[in-house]
Image (tube, rainbow, N blue to C red):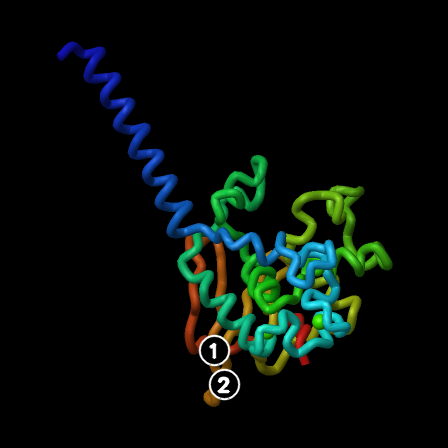
C-alpha cells in the first residue's frame, strides 16, 4: 500500500470514529424530549412552552398542584424530571455557535430547573415571557441583547433570578432548602433541590462546566443562599 492509501484510510477511520463518538454522545448523553416544550397538551394551539395553563383546566400552572394533570404532584414530577437528567453533558459552548451543543441535547445549569419544571407542566419560559411583556423593567435588557426576542433569554440564570425577585418568589438567604427550590450560587449559576433530609442536608441536581455531566449530589450540607421558591 502506498503512503497516500494509508493516509486516506487513516483519515476515513478518524472520520468514522468522530461520527461514532458524536452519535454516542448525542444518543446517550443528550436530552432530546423536546415535546415537553413543543407539544400542546390541551390542544389549544398554544405550545406547552408558552401555555399559562398547560393542561387547560382553568387553573394557571403555578396555582395548579398538578399542572400537567398526570395524577402526580408538581413536586413529584419536578424531582423525577430532574433526576432523569443525570448523565446529560454540559454544553461547553453554552448555547453559542448556533446552539450546536443544544441541538446535540447538551444542557446548561438553568436547563435543569427549566426542563424539570416543564416536566411538571410548568414552563419557566412562559412565566418569564409573560412577565417581560408586562414589566420589561424587571430585567437587565443589556441594550436589547437580553430580551425574549433573543434566543438565549430563557436560558440565563439571572433572568430567572430577576423574575423571582420581582414577583415575590425570591427567598433571600434561605435558612433551609425545600424541594423544587432553584438555588442561586450567583447570578450565573443555579441548581435544583430534589430532596431534603432530617439532618438538614439536601439533594440537588446540578449541571456545571467543571463536572462535565449533570449529576445528582446527595446529602449536601446547606449553605445559606438565595432561592427561587415558585411552589407553595
Ligand atoms: Ca396548549
Ligand atoms: Ca392548569
Ligand atoms: Ca403532575
Q: Which residue is mark 1?
A: 221
Q: Look at the image and tell me whether residue 109 can be seen.
A: yes
Name the quadrant containing residue 129: bottom right
Looking at this view, name the residue that lies furthest to the bottom: 198
Quarter of the rendered structure image containing ligand 2: bottom right
**Circle 2 SS class:** loop
**Circle 1 SS class:** loop
Which quarter shows the C terminus?
A: bottom right
Who is closer to the viewer here, 116 or 175? 116
Q: Position of residue 109 (x, y in %)?
A: 54, 57
* Marks 2 and 1, how far apart at CA: 7 Å
Identity of the residue drawn at 75% across and 74% down: 59
Who is closer to the viewer here, 52 or 189? 52
Looking at this view, name the residue that lies furthest to the left: 1
Q: Which residue is mark 2?
A: 200
User: Going by the image, does 134 lie left or right of 226?
Assistant: right
User: Going by the image, does 210 lie left or right of 125?
Assistant: left
Name the quadrant containing residue 182: bottom right
Q: Position of residue 48 (x, y in %)?
A: 67, 58
Disc on the earlier residue, 2 or 1: 2
Do the numbered discs 2 and 1 sit on residues whose CB atoms are within 8 Å? yes
Q: Position of residue 216 (x, y in %)?
A: 43, 67
Identity of the residue drawn at 73% across and 72% down: 57
Residue 192 higher or lower than 73, as above or below: above
Residue 213 higher or lower than 82, as above or below: above
Identity of the residue drawn at 47% across and 75% down: 203
User: Going by the image, does 6 lie left or right of 33?
Assistant: left
Amino acid at each position: 500500500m502506498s503512503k497516500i492509501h494509508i493516509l486516506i484510510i487513516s483519515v476515513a477511520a478518524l472520520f468514522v470514529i468522530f461520527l461514532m463518538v458524536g452519535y454516542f454522545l448525542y444518543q446517550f448523553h443528550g436530552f432530546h424530549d423536546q415535546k415537553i416544550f413543543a407539544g400542546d397538551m390541551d390542544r389549544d394551539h398554544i405550545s406547552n412552552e408558552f401555555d399559562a395553563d398547560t393542561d387547560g383546566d382553568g387553573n394557571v400552572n403555578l396555582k395548579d398542584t398538578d399542572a400537567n394533570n398526570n395524577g402526580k404532584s408538581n413536586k413529584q414530577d419536578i424531582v423525577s424530571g430532574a433526576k432523569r437528567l443525570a448523565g446529560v453533558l454540559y454544553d461547553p459552548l453554552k448555547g453559542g455557535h448556533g446552539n450546536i451543543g443544544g441541538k446535540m441535547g447538551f444542557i446548561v445549569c438553568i436547563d435543569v430547573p427549566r426542563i424539570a419544571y416543564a416536566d411538571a407542566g410548568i414552563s419557566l419560559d412562559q412565566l418569564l415571557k409573560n412577565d417581560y411583556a408586562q414589566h420589561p423593567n424587571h430585567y437587565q435588557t443589556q441594550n436589547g441583547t437580553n430580551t425574549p426576542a433573543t434566543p438565549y433569554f430563557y436560558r440565563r440564570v439571572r433572568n430567572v433570578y430577576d423574575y423571582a425577585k420581582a414577583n415575590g418568589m425570591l427567598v433571600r438567604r434561605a435558612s433551609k432548602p425545600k424541594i423544587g427550590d432553584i438555588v442561586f450560587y450567583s447570578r450565573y449559576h443555579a441548581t435544583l433541590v430534589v430532596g431534603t433530609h432530617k439532618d438538614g442536608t439536601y439533594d440537588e441536581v446540578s449541571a456545571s462546566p467543571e463536572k462535565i455531566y449533570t449529576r445528582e449530589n446527595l446529602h449536601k450540607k446547606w449553605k445559606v443562599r438565595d432561592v427561587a421558591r415558585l411552589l407553595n
